[in-house]
Amino acid sequence: MTAAEATPELDLADPTGHDDRAFLGHPKGLGYLGLVEGCERFSYYSMQTLLTLYMVNYLLHPDHQEAVLGLDWVKAHIWSGLEGQPLASRIFGAYTAAVYLTPILGGILADLFLGRRAALIAGGIVMSLGHFLMAFESAFLFALVTLVIGVGLFKGNIASQVGELYGPNDSRRAMAFQIFYIFINVSVIAAPLISGSLGEDVGWHWGFGCAGVVMVLGLLLYLAARPYLPAETQGNSRTEQPRAKFARGDGPRLIAVLLLVPVMAIALLTNQEIFNAYLVWADQHFQLTFFGKTLPTSWMITIDATLSFSMLVAVAAFWNWIGRKTGREPDELGKMIIGSFFTIGGGLCLWFAAATQGAGKIGLFWPVMFHLVNSIGFAHVLPVSLALFTRLAPRALNASIVGIYYLAFFIANYTVGVIGGWYSTMSTPQFWLLHAASAAVGLIAFSAFKLFLANRLMSEADPLPT
């Protein structure tokens, strides 16, 4: 399952001063913001889908890597002795880990210096530049740095504008974020089909260039949307509000949150590996030829994204039905424990596919089963884990808890970069069995947390709104 784009709801006043229902009963600005975010996510997931395949199948070959400025220094001082797929895995891990840190800095810059609108526009420009730099092999490392900076400036400064389109008591707010999320999911499904096909079938730089063009389109849409968006808020307005203080019991709850970060990181490993070693394995060993035509390997990401979105809807509907029928459903940790069983099952699907491969190619039955089972697992883990973090968080840190939460993704992606490099030296069944074991670690940790700590900490925490 592709990583969910969780966005907390914001309690901000309606800046528009009128009841705008021009877009599906919602403000016209929501349609613009959804399209802009869709363009940004299209460009990002185009890059993430193509990156490892591009490095392994082209850029890091001996006759191409010498042209990459700075790569010799990186190989000598950062990842000494690594070549080929292990080196590609480390670069992928560092890049995808960094994009979970820079939005924190981008938010700070927007609040204190640039303002949200200027930061977002700057991010869009820098991201577009990064995608176009990917057309030049020599600029590869500079392109990655540019993209990381661009995502940091852009990502954290668009979702907050969705909440500001509505007053604090507007019942449309929750549906607005669901519509916003649909734009994201459609983009994640489309990116591998379009950019992935261009990159693999026409030329790698065509795929990256397509991502850049779509990012420019998103930037132009944002500029055109200005009359329909919330006015810029003053960065220092928050300082006029009283500062929250730590309350009794906040210490253990903060420790619990910090302990859950590495646990979440371990539980995420199988999911985050999908864009890395999994794609290399699929490219080398999956039977992707149908009626004489070989499909792009990147289409596996479209399969994953489609099943991910479907299972998010299906799982939410299932537990809603259970709740209506029985009057109760599992709490956050209960759902995360259930999800861990499915995640283990997904990893075992990959293990079984590798263990039974034989001399031929691997059919798509077990890989598709992996995407299905893993998506069910993460539909139980990812949406509710942020709710668990915010429920446990001390009030004094409520605004910072999302940044703390996404440290799990930073750790997971960096770790995937390390473990993904083992694909070239470890037997493939063992490699995927290791990932199933990482999900088992998450299961044990979530179960222990629920058994020994949850009752006391949850009773001290504020109940979630119903």
Image (cartoon, rainbow, N blue to C red):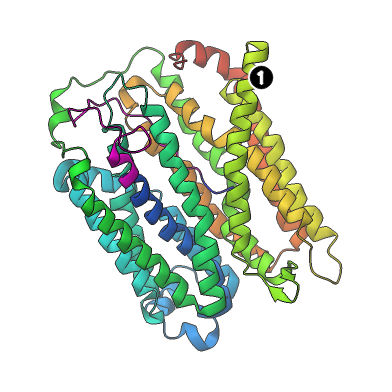
Residue 239: say if magenta.
no
Residue 190 appears left or right of 33: right
Can residue 334 be seen from the camera position used here? no
- Where residue 282 appears, as percent x and y from the top left, is 68, 65
Residue 273 appears left or right of 96: right
Q: In which quarter of the image is residue 255?
A: top left
Q: What amino acid type is highlighted by mark number 1? A: Ile
User: What residue sits 26% from the left and 43% below the top?
Assistant: 107
Can residue 410 be seen from the camera position used here? yes
User: Magenta stretch?
Assistant: 4-32
243, 319: nearer the viewer: 319
Q: Is residue 61 above or below residue 256?
A: below
- Where residue 422 appears, as percent x and y from the top left, is 65, 63
User: What residue sits 34% from the left and 61% below the top?
Assistant: 215
- Where residue 147 appears, as percent x and y from the top left, is 35, 62
Label 1, residues with CA under 10 Å away: few <14, some 14-19, many ≥20: some
User: What residue sits 68% from the left and 30% below the top?
Assistant: 338
Q: In which quarter of the image is residue 150?
A: bottom left
Q: Quadrant of residue 394?
A: top left
**Residue identified by numbered label 1:** 322
Q: In this view, does 68 lie above or below 25?
A: below
- Label 1: which secondary element: helix
Principal SS element in the magenta part? Answer: loop
339, 293: nearer the viewer: 293
Residue 20: say if magenta.
yes
403, 223: nearer the viewer: 223
